[in-house]
Image (tube, rainbow, N blue to C red):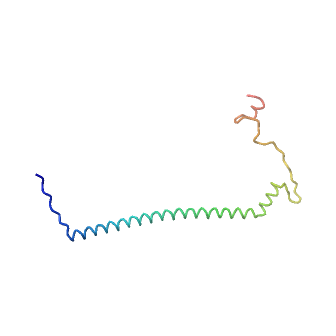
């Protein structure tokens, strides 16, 4: 014969405890969600601050380059190298040399092996 189950009474005290447990669990869930959101926002802020720092660095580099491109030193270099110009009193010399990349040798072959064989 099976044992009889005890009768459980559900009174006002139990009702208050159940509602309190429900409220505590809802508050705990909200706190965890808030903490997770806060952590995600902190990571996003850190990433954006790194990106901002990198953009400041790039801007400073570009401003330096723009300043150099406006300088007399750059203009003189372009005039000498690309246009072949020289200052008054200087003599411009054009050197015609063979292409250093075209040696006629195989990679690893020494210059005397090309001339005298192996």
Q: Residue at x 26, y 67 (%)?
A: 18
Measured as percent of width and height from the top left, residue 97 is found at 82, 44
Looking at the figure, which quarter contains the C terminus? top right
Farthest-out residue, left: 1
Q: Residue at x 22, y 68 (%)?
A: 14
Q: Is residue 26 left or right of residue 102?
A: left
Q: Is residue 59 left or right of residue 86?
A: left
Quarter of the view holding residue 32: bottom left
Question: Is residue 78 positioned above or below 100 on the image?
Answer: below
Farthest-out residue, right: 89
Quarter of the view holding residue 39: bottom left
Measured as percent of width and height from the top left, residue 83 is found at 83, 55
Give 4 or 61, whichever is nearer the viewer.
4
Q: Residue at x 77, y 60 (%)?
A: 74
Give 39 or 111, whichever is nearer the viewer.
39
Total labels drawn:
0
Q: Residue at x 50, y 63 (%)?
A: 44
Quarter of the view holding residue 100: top right
Measured as percent of width and height from the top left, residue 87 is found at 86, 59
Farthest-out residue, top: 118
Give 107 or 20, whichever is nearer the viewer.
20
Measured as percent of width and height from the top left, residue 4 is found at 13, 57
């Amino acid at each position: 014969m099976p044992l009889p189950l005890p009768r459980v009474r559900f009174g006002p005290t139990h009702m208050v405890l159940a509602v309190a447990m429900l409220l505590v669990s809802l508050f705990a869930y909200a706190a965890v969600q808030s903490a997770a959101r806060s952590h995600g926002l902190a990571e996003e802020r850190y990433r954006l601050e790194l990106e901002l720092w990198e953009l400041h660095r790039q801007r400073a580099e570009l401003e330096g380059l723009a300043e150099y491109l406006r300088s007399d030193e750059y203009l003189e270099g372009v005039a000498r190298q690309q246009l072949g110009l020289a200052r008054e009193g200087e003599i411009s010399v054009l050197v015609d040399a063979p292409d250093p990349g075209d040696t006629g040798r195989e990679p690893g072959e020494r210059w005397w092996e090309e001339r005298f064989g192996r």
